[in-house]
Image (cartoon, rainbow, N blue to C red):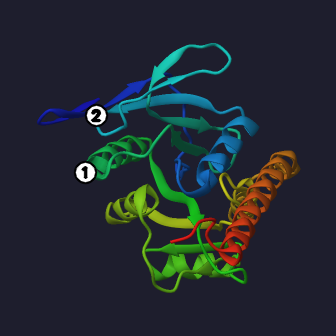
Amino acid sequence: MRQPNGNAFTYLHKISDVKIKSPAVVIQGLPGMGLIGKIAANYLINHFKAEEIVRIYSSFFPPVVQIDSKTSIGRLARMEIYAITKTTPNLLVLTGDAQPHDIGIIQVLNSVLDYVIDLKADTLICLGGLRVHEEGPEVAGFGYDKETLDWLEKHDVTLLKGGEVTGAVGVLSALAAERNLKSFGLLGKLTLAGTDPKASKALLKQLTKLYPLQLKLKDLDLTIEEAQAKNDRITSLAREVLEQGEDEKEQGPGYYI
């Protein structure tokens, strides 16, 4: 499926045919704040041994070739869709190397919607990150109709009160709602510098409240410990630099004017 737009293009390359039981649920986890959504999406893919069904290439992705650290094999930056048929409902997981550039994000994500709607998907969930105060909720949500918002609150999701949702999390969920899918977003509270698998685990835990998914979330604990240790090192280094700067201010300049 190739969709030209002047010199731009978006191309969906089918990898395999998998029979999806409808209605299916689409879960988007693309790179973003703290890689929260991507870590959660990758966990679902690995846990359920999902099958890759589509690769998405576009001139709106960064002009980058990714080199595999183990095989040294390169590949063009892309997004992928994986099918999970062991769950009820079946899941279609959208992830990838990067989000589309702003100028082409609507074209690329509409191409994704065309594909998943053909597979009879009726719900779309976008996973991402949220910067909040220390007392903020572990997971916050947003949606596009009262029925969905009431359903989220019934399952203990704190709703956003104002603000903006940027990037693919906001755009894809909004486009899906415009095309009459049940659409909402779940945002995990960012607490660590760099990647934040702790927030990813909170999102996955919330998903198990919304759908009967059997997830062994303890598998993420080692990743969380490593991320926490890295966060502590960064915090300690930042504190040392700050204290050193304060000491230099107190001592004054090491020269005369």
Q: How many marks?
A: 2
**Element at badge 1?**
helix
- Asked if labels 2 and 1 touch by Cβ distance under 8 angstroms, the answer is no
- Residue farthest bottom in this picture: 161
Q: Position of residue 227 (x, y in %)?
A: 77, 51
| Up-down relation of residue 169 to residue 112 (above or below) | below
* Left-right relation of 201 to 19: right
* Left-right relation of 57 to 234: left
- Residue farthest left in this picture: 6
| Up-down relation of residue 50 to residue 232 (above or below) | above
Indicate the quadrant containing the N terminus: top left, top right, bottom left or bottom right.
Answer: top left
Q: Amino acid at mark 2?
A: Ser
Q: Position of residue 104 (x, y in %)?
A: 26, 47
Q: Mark 1 Cα within 10 Å, few/some/many (few <14, many 20+)? A: few
Q: Mark 2 Cα within 10 Å, few/some/many (few <14, many 20+)? A: some
Q: Residue at x 75, y 53 (%)?
A: 213
- Residue farthest front in this picture: 256
Q: Nearer the viewer, residue 154 or 138?
A: 138
Q: Position of residue 192 (x, y in %)?
A: 71, 61
Residue annotated with mark 1:
103
State the separation of the CA atoms marked 1 and 2.
11 Å
Q: Residue at x 53, y 42 (%)?
A: 95
Residue annotated with mark 2:
59
Q: Amino acid at mark 1?
A: Ile
Q: Position of residue 193 (x, y in %)?
A: 68, 58
| Up-down relation of residue 252 to residue 168 (above or below) | below
Where, by quadrant of the figure, is residue 58 drawn? top left
Residue 3 marker: none
Indicate which disc, 1 or 2, sits on the residue closer to the N terminus: 2
